[in-house]
Amino acid sequence: EKLDTFSSQEIANTVWAYAKVGHPAPKLFDAISKKAIERLNTFNSQELVNTVWAYARLGHSAPELFDAISQKMIEKINTINKQGIANTVWAYAKLGHSAPELFDAISHIAIKKL
């Protein structure tokens, strides 16, 4: 499977591109979700943000991925820029995915960045 060879950047760029052109690809997004979860330790904060944005933009629910990413984002919260924070909360809200620990961490960092 080609996805086995994708880097975190290639995964994030792929889902971002599909979302940018508004082209749903449910089977691809389901497969990428599984691979991304396996590799989350290699994702930087921008790749995490771009990934959740892409899933939300296309309305593709991936609860396990969003749960895993929320934990990873908490670890990297100080490296997420203001636009990334805005895109993240939008993505979780758009899909109706609850992530209270992530939202608490974001509110603490947002207050500092205001």
Image: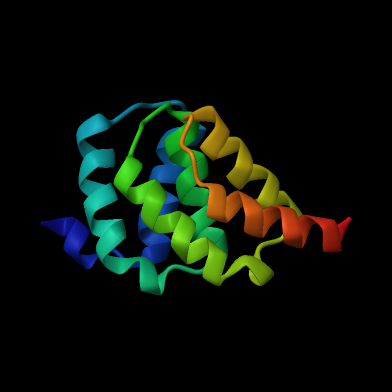
Nearer to us in this view, 89 or 107 = 107
**Which residue shows up at 61% across the image and 36% down it?**
90
**Which residue shows up at 46% across the image and 36% down it?**
97
Where residue 63 sits, quadrant-wise, is: top left
Q: Which quarter of the image is occupied by the N terminus?
A: bottom left
Nearer to us in this view, 64 or 44 = 64
**Position of residue 94 in the picture relative to residue 36 (left or right):** right
**Which residue shows up at 20% across the image and 34% down it?**
27
Q: Which quarter of the image is occupied by the C terminus?
A: bottom right
- Place of residue 49 in the rendered image (x, y in percent of width and height, measured from the top left): 54, 53
**Which residue shows up at 36% across the image and 31% down it?**
60
Residue sitting farthest toward the left? 1
Where residue 81 sits, quadrant-wise, is: bottom right
- Place of residue 41 in the rendered image (x, y in percent of width and height, measured from the top left): 38, 73
- Above or below — where is 111 with respect to 52? below
Residue sitting farthest toward the right? 114
**Position of residue 114 in the picture relative to residue 28 (left or right):** right
- Place of residue 36 in the rendered image (x, y in percent of width and height, measured from the top left): 31, 58
Where residue 3 sits, quadrant-wise, is: bottom left
Number of marks present in the image shown: 0
- Above or below — where is 58 with respect to 32? above
